Amino acid sequence: MEKIGFIGLGRMGKPMASNLRKKGYDLVVHDLNESAVAELIELGASKGASIASIAEECSVVITMLPSSVEVEGVALGPGGIFENAKRGTILLDMSTIDPLATERLSIAAQARGLSVVDAPVGRLAQHADRGESLFMVGASEADFVRVEPLLMGMGTTVYHCGGVGAGGRTKLVNNYMVVALCQMNGEALALSQRFGLDLANTLQVLYGTSASNGQLRMNFPNKVLVGDTTPGFTIDLAHKDMSLVLGAAHALKVPMPLAAAVFENYSLARSAEYGKLDFTGIADVICDLAHIERARVPKGWTPPV
């Protein structure tokens, strides 16, 4: 079995690394958060002395980091992965980053006899906890064969979307719709509240028509509608992803006025210090800014089947 490096043990990375250990993978981990590293060591992982040592030891190095800046720094910087990895090593980046950064990484990797796979994550933190993540993969056929068992060790669904970069671009399409739906749902719920409608009745109607959507049906009832805005995926991260969507769209001359409006609404939420909330909390932001009572379902309410 290959030795696997795992860099980035945040809210998504830690449970995914934990699931790999539980599946028996030989794991070497690194994170600035020592307590997260300690939790993985308790599961049988070993602590990497440095990024360089992880690259030297491991034939696949997984990164799960906040942005392009961190991924490129870890891969390309002094003492980084590319400088120290053996030929044939794969950088498996599961972060959501600029597709142009993925292309830069791939070019630099190829020059050193290495390769890059982009495999950003679909679904939410609670899915990562349960080993139910979805992955969108950009990779050569040979690299996909190598990384697919790893991804299945962390999730239940893996899509090979095309060559390097296709996974990240698919993720941007997905996250654009997810984030925009949260904004739309938040506005609709605020309007319902202002109208003085019964929220449970309104939701029953919405779930029974084509207005229903995955966020409203799957995510909102478990988060903001029951008053839970502890972060799984924050407003700050949603804002970051929308900036990537708009940057990629502008580069390719794709007009996305709705995306621009959603981006600015998340900018407004961040400026009002809501950035650390779960992104479903955008519904609370809209209500608060309009001085409307926050939308909450009655205790014990469950979505209609």
Image (tube, helix red, strand yellow):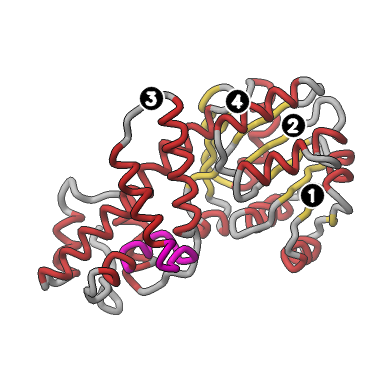
Determine which residue is flagged by label 2: 90
Residue 34 in percent (x, y) is at 77, 65
* Residue 164 badge: 4
Q: Residue at x 44, y 38 (%)?
A: 245
Helix, strand or loop for disc 2: strand
Tell me the residue that label 3 is attached to.
253
For label 3, the SS is loop
Asked if residue 78 lies left or right of residue 262, the reply is right
Marks 1 and 3, how far apart at CA: 42 Å
**x then y, percent, for residue 294:** 27, 73
First of labels 1, 2 by sequence position: 1
Task: Residue type at mark 1: give it.
Answer: Leu
- Label 1: which residue? 27
Label 1 vs 3, first from the N-terminus? 1
Are discs 2 and 3 less than 8 Å apart at CB?
A: no
| Mark 2 or 3: the one toward you | 3
Mark 2, other Cα within 10 Å: few <14 / some 14–19 / many ≥20: many
- Per the model, the C-alpha gap separating discs 1 and 2 is 15 Å
Task: Residue at 75% x, 38% y: name it.
Answer: 75
